[in-house]
Amino acid sequence: NHGPASWASLSYSRDVSVTLMYGLWKVCAGPDCKDLSDYSIYITDAWKAASAFSILGMVAGIAALGLACYHFIMRVLAKPETQTLKFIIMVAGILALLCVIISTSCFGGGVYQKYLMDKAGFDIGYSLILSAVGGIVICIGGVVFFVAS
C-alpha cells in the first residue's frame, strides 16, 4: 500500500519514527493509509474545493493535450487549420493554470493554515509543488501553441 501524493507531511519520532502525509484524497500514518472521507468531520470546505479544482485543472490539461494532438493529426492529414481550435487549446491551458492556482490557494490558506500545519512542523509536500509546476507548464504550452501556429 503506497502513500498518497503528499501535499503536506510531517516526520516525528518518539519510540518509533512515523511520517504523517496528507494528500487531497488520502491520509497516511507511515505505511497505513485511509481515505480522507473516513475523517469527514475534519474535511473543511477549503479541502473539498482544493480537491475539486485539482480535478478540474487536470481535466482542462487533458483537454488541451487531446485537442493539441487532434490539431497535429489534422495538420498531418493536410486538413485546413482553424483559429478557433488553437484558441480553445490556449484557453484550456490557461484554465488549467487557474484551477491549479485556486486549488493550491485553497489548500494553503484554508487547510495548511487552518490546521496550523506550519507551526506543527509540517512540510509542503512534493505533490503540491508538482501540481503548481504542471499547471504553469500546461499554460505556457497552450499559449506557445497558440502564438507559434
Image (cartoon, rainbow, N blue to C red):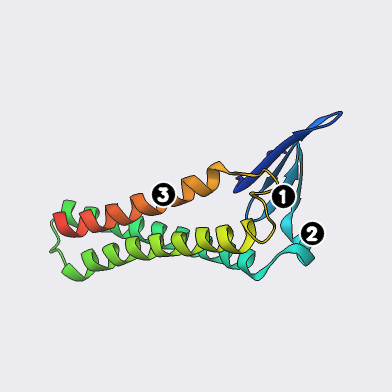
Residue at 23% over, 67% down: 87
> Which residue is more in the foreground, 61 or 99?
99
Considering the numbered disc 3 on the image, is that residue within a helix, a strand or a loop? helix
The residue that disc 2 covers is 38
Image coordinates of residue 143 in percent, x first then y, are 24, 58
Q: Is residue 16 visible?
A: yes
Q: Residue at x 65, y 43 (%)?
A: 9
Q: Could you say whether the residue bearing mark 1 is in a helix, strand or loop?
A: strand
Give amino acid for label 1. Val
Q: Quadrant of the N terminus?
A: top right
Q: Earlier in the sequence, mark 1 or mark 2?
A: 1
Q: Amino acid at mark 3?
A: Gly
Quadrant the C terminus occupies: bottom left
- Cα distance in 3D space between marks 1 and 2: 9 Å
Q: Tell which circle, 3 or 1, labels the residue nearer the N-terminal end.
A: 1
Mark nearer the N terminus (3 vs 2):
2
Provide the secondary structure element on which disc 2 rests.
helix
- The local crowd at label 1, few if under 14, some if 14 to 19, many if 20 or more residues have their Cα within 10 Å, is many
Mark 2, residues whose alpha carbon is within 10 Å: few (<14), some, or many (≥20)? Answer: few
How far from the left and from the top, in percent, is residue 89? Answer: 28, 63
* For residue 134, side relative to residue 85 (left or right): right
Q: Amino acid at mark 2?
A: Asp
Q: Which mark is residue 134?
A: 3
Most foreground residue, 62 or 26: 26
